[in-house]
Image: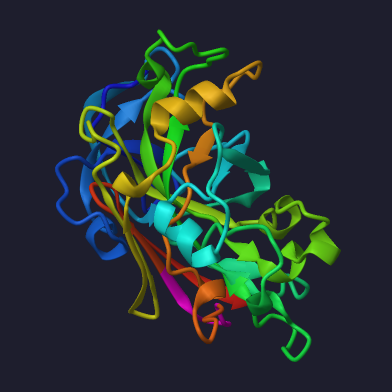
């Protein structure tokens, strides 16, 4: 796998796409990245042979999703203890709760997020999957309940399967990025989703990731990071990965049991408390809202919600 500190994928002013090293940049935000001059890598992907840093440099004109193709998103539900408490849910047992998002859910860290006219009740966090009074939409307009969720995310960089208790799971990790599990609570209600959360979370671009992938050499302790969400500048979530039930090794071992995890796979590890559904009143995302997702030592994404007409 590639040797880097903070890997960024971007376009220059001519529209050419590059991977670059953003490890020397102090401000991993939209303003801090656009216009920055960074050294670039040669090679196809960070897990293929010949992917090496060069002396050539390019100027960032547009920041892209840090992985060109995400084959699948695996997502962990109810992984933060404080979130389980706010949801009034039962704590997970021996194994994590898992659901998936398709490849089309991927979006860049600063992209607008289009919301389909039937993706009602937009929320910003991975939540429990039982029926909840806050999910009721009988008196609401079509898209009043859209919810987002900040998620510390693992990026797989080496094919793995059946990772055992004696294996080192970190050898398969390319690095870590920020993610957001956008959810349409309308489609998560039991009588529409039939108890399955996937349909509510699988709309196009409902999984923005970025702005960079931070190496495991930089983030040596994945259970010591702050995670935050802001909507229109107002803080909605403020938690820490030290509140997890299941850590990175446990999640990788569980997901790889009988399943081959391919390079580029993104694993979202859950969200802290403060989700829209459990606010009083619920604070669902609205058209033109600006969602900022921030994880310590990774950076800040900034996505605008756009309701399609």
Residue closest to the eye, 50 or 214: 214
Magenta stretch, main secondary structure class: loop
Q: Could you tell me which quadrant the N terminus lies in?
A: top left
Q: Residue at x 52, y 81 (%)?
A: 283
Residue closest to the eye, 100 or 8: 100
- Tell me: residue 29, above or below residue 46: below
Q: Is 226 situated left or right of 256 in this image?
A: left
Q: Is residue 85 magenta?
A: no
Write down the region rendered in magenta.
285-291
Q: How many numbered callouts?
A: 0
Q: Which residue, as the protein is rendered here, is positioned at the far bottom? A: 139
Q: Is 208 situated left or right of 36 in this image?
A: right
Residue 51 visible (yes or no): yes
Residue 29 image position (x, y, % from top left):
28, 60
Residue closest to the eye, 110 or 278: 278
Q: Could you tell me which quadrant the C terminus lies in?
A: bottom right
Residue 200 image position (x, y, % from top left):
71, 59
Residue closest to the eye, 13 or 237: 237
Residue 9 visible (yes or no): no
Residue 142 image position (x, y, % from top left):
75, 83
- Tell me: residue 110, above or below residue 2: below
């Amino acid at each position: 796998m590639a040797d880097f500190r903070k890997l960024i994928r971007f376009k220059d002013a001519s529209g050419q796409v590059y991977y670059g090293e953003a490890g020397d940049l102090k401000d991993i935000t939209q303003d801090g990245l656009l216009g920055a001059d960074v050294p670039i890598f040669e090679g196809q992907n960070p897990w293929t042979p010949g992917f090496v840093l060069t002396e050539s440099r390019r100027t960032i004109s547009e920041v892209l999703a840090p992985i060109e193709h995400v084959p699948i998103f695996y997502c962990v539900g109810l992984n933060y203890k404080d979130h389980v408490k706010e949801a009034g849910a039962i704590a997970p047992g021996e194994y994590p709760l898992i659901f998936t998002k398709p490849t089309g859910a991927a979006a860049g860290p600063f992209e607008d997020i289009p919301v389909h006219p039937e993706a009602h009740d937009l929320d910003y966090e991975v939540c429990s999957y039982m029926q909840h009074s806050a999910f009721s939409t009988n008196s609401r307009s079509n898209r009043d309940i859209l919810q987002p969720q900040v998620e510390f995310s693992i990026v797989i960089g080496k094919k793995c399967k059946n990772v055992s208790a004696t294996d080192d799971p970190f050898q398969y990790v390319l690095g870590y990025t920020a993610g957001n599990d956008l959810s349409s609570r309308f489609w998560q209600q039991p009588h529409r989703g039939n108890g399955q959360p996937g349909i509510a979370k699988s709309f196009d671009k409902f999984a923005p990731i970025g702005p960079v992938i931070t190496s495991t050499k930089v983030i040596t302790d994945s259970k010591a990071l702050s995670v935050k969400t802001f909507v229109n500048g107002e803080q909605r979530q403020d938690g820490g990965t030290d509140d997890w039930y299941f850590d990175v090794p446990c999640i990788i071992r569980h997901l790889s049991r009988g399943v081959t995890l391919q390079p580029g796979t993104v694993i979202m590890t859950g969200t802290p408390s403060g989700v829209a559904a459990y606010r009083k009143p619920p604070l669902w995302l609205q058209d033109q809202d600006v969602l900022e997702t921030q994880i310590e030592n990774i950076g800040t994404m900034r996505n605008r919600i756009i309701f399609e007409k």
